[in-house]
Image (cartoon, rainbow, N blue to C red):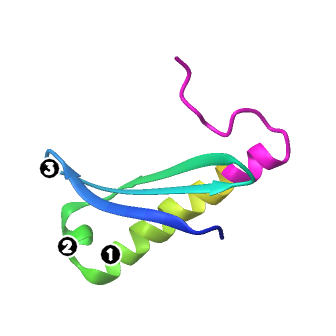
């Protein structure tokens, strides 16, 4: 897994985990939204972070294999 940045925050009442990483010049983002009770527990945070990291890794792998834009937003 490349070096990445993880942020935990609340979007209104929704607990959100966001992981951002760069691999071979491409950036990827993995996002996970979880329940409030899960987010407040340390084990819940680690599970939500693992889910976001897995999504991030899948996006970066897909891009590396030539499978599109890796989920990047279009402007």
Q: Quadrant of residue 67?
A: top right
Q: Residue at x 48, y 60 (%)?
A: 52
In the rendered image of this protein, does residue 10 appear above or below residue 51?
Answer: above
User: Which of the two discs, 3 and 2, labels the residue nearer the N terminus?
Assistant: 3
In the rendered image of this protein, does residue 48 appear above or below residue 34?
Answer: below
Left or right of 56 on screen, residue 44: left
In the rendered image of this protein, does residue 38 appear above or below residue 70?
Answer: below
Q: Residue at x 32, y 75 (%)?
A: 44
Q: Which residue is mark 2?
A: 40
Residue 41 position within the rendered picture, expressed as x and y whole percent measured from the top left:
23, 79
Residue 38 position within the rendered picture, expressed as x and y whole percent measured from the top left:
26, 70
Bounds of the magenta segment? 60-75
73 in the magenta segment: yes
> Secondary structure under badge 1?
helix
Which SS type dominates the magenta stretch?
loop
Q: Which residue lies most toward the front here?
A: 25
Residue contact between numbered discs 1 and 2, judged by CB atoms under 8 Å: yes
Residue 1 numbered mark, or none: none
Q: Quadrant of residue 37?
A: bottom left
Q: Quadrant of residue 57?
A: bottom right
Specify few, some or many for label 2: CA neighbours under 10 Å numbering under 14, 14-19, or 20 or more. Answer: few
Q: Residue at x 85, y 47 (%)?
A: 65
Instruction: Work out how far the residue at label 3 is from the one at label 2, CA to CA, in angstroms.
Output: 12 Å
> Secondary structure under badge 3?
loop
Residue 44 numbered mark, or none: 1
Q: Residue at x 67, y 40 (%)?
A: 70
Q: Which residue is mark 3?
A: 13
């Amino acid at each position: 897994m490349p070096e990445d940045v993880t942020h935990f925050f609340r979007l209104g009442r929704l607990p959100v985990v966001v992981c951002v990483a760069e691999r071979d010049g491409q950036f990827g983002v993995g996002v996970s939204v979880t329940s409030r009770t899960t987010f407040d527990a340390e084990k819940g945070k680690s599970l939500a972070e693992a889910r976001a990291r897995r999504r991030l890794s899948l996006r970066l792998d897909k891009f590396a294999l030539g499978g599109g834009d890796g989920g990047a937003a279009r402007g």
